Amino acid sequence: MIKRIAVYPGSFDPIHNGHLDIIERCRPIFDEVLVAVLHNEEKRALFSVEERVEIIREMVDGHADCRVESFSGLLVDFMDRVGARAVVRGLRAVSDFEYEFQMALMNRRLNPRVETVFMMPKEDYSYLSSRLVKEVYALGGDLTGLVPDPVLERLRQRLRPAEVGASAR
Ligand code: PNS
C-alpha cells in the first residue's frame, strides 16, 4: 500500500501552538506527517535550522507517524524525493489566502502531482504568528498557551528585549 505522506513545510522560526494544532489535525488523515523546515540563506532567522528541527522533533517525539526534516531548493522537488503528494498549509485568515493561493498554483504548475491541502487552526490561534511570538517575547509579553515550553525556554536563552528577530511567520 502506498503511504499517504503530508509534507507540512515552513520556516517555523519558532514553531508555535498554531503549527502544532495543524500537525495534530493532519495525523488522523495521513499515514505520515513530514514537517519540512526550510533552509533559507537569505532570511534572517532567530533560530538555526538545526535548532528548529531539534525543537520540532522534541514536540513530535513519540509520534511514530511524524517526521521532521530540513530542505532547501524547491518544495516540489523535496516532495518527489520523499514520495509525497500533499502539501499542508495552515490558513489563519483571509489575509493568508492570496499568498497561499499563489504558492499552491505555482507548486502545481511546477509539479502537477502535488496538491495543496489547507487546514484551519483552532480559532484561538488564528492571530498567532512566529513573528509576533518573537516580538511579544522580546517586549516582555506573556506567551502562556501560545508556544510550547521548549520554545519558551529557548526564547529565554536567546532573546533579550529589543532583539526582535526575522519576520518569518
Ligand atoms: O513559513 P513560511 O515562511 O510561510 O513557509 C514558506 C515555504 C517554506 C512553504 C515556502 O517559502 C517554500 O516552499 N519555499 C521553498 C522554495 C520553493 O519551493 N519556492 C516556490 C514556492 S511556489
Image: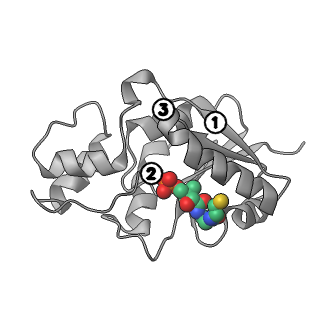
Task: Indicate the quadrant containing the N terminus: top left, top right, bottom left or bottom right.
Answer: top right
Residue 169 percent coordinates (x, y): 41, 50
Which color scheme does this rendered protein use? one colour
Residue 157 percent coordinates (x, y): 17, 59
* Residue under the image location 18 percent in, 47 percent down: 137
User: Is 40 above or below relative to 102?
Assistant: below
Mark 2 crowdedness (10 Å alpha carbons): few <14, some 14-19, many ≥20: many
Amino acid at circle 2: Ile
Give the structural element (helix, strand or loop) at label 1: strand
Amino acid at circle 1: Phe
Whether tag 1 and tag 2 are in contact, CB under 8 A, the answer is no
Q: CA distance from mark 1 to mark 2?
A: 20 Å
Residue identifier under label 2: 56
Residue 142 percent coordinates (x, y): 16, 36
Of mark 1 and mark 2, the one earlier in the sequence is 2
Quick one: 26 or 113, which is closer to the camera? 113
Quick one: 111 or 65, which is closer to the camera? 111
Mark 1 crowdedness (10 Å alpha carbons): few <14, some 14-19, many ≥20: some
Relative placement, left or right, of 6 versus 168 is: right
Residue identifier under label 3: 93
Of mark 2 and mark 3, the one earlier in the sequence is 2
* Residue under the image location 51 percent in, 41 percent down: 96
Q: CA distance from mark 2 to mark 3?
A: 24 Å
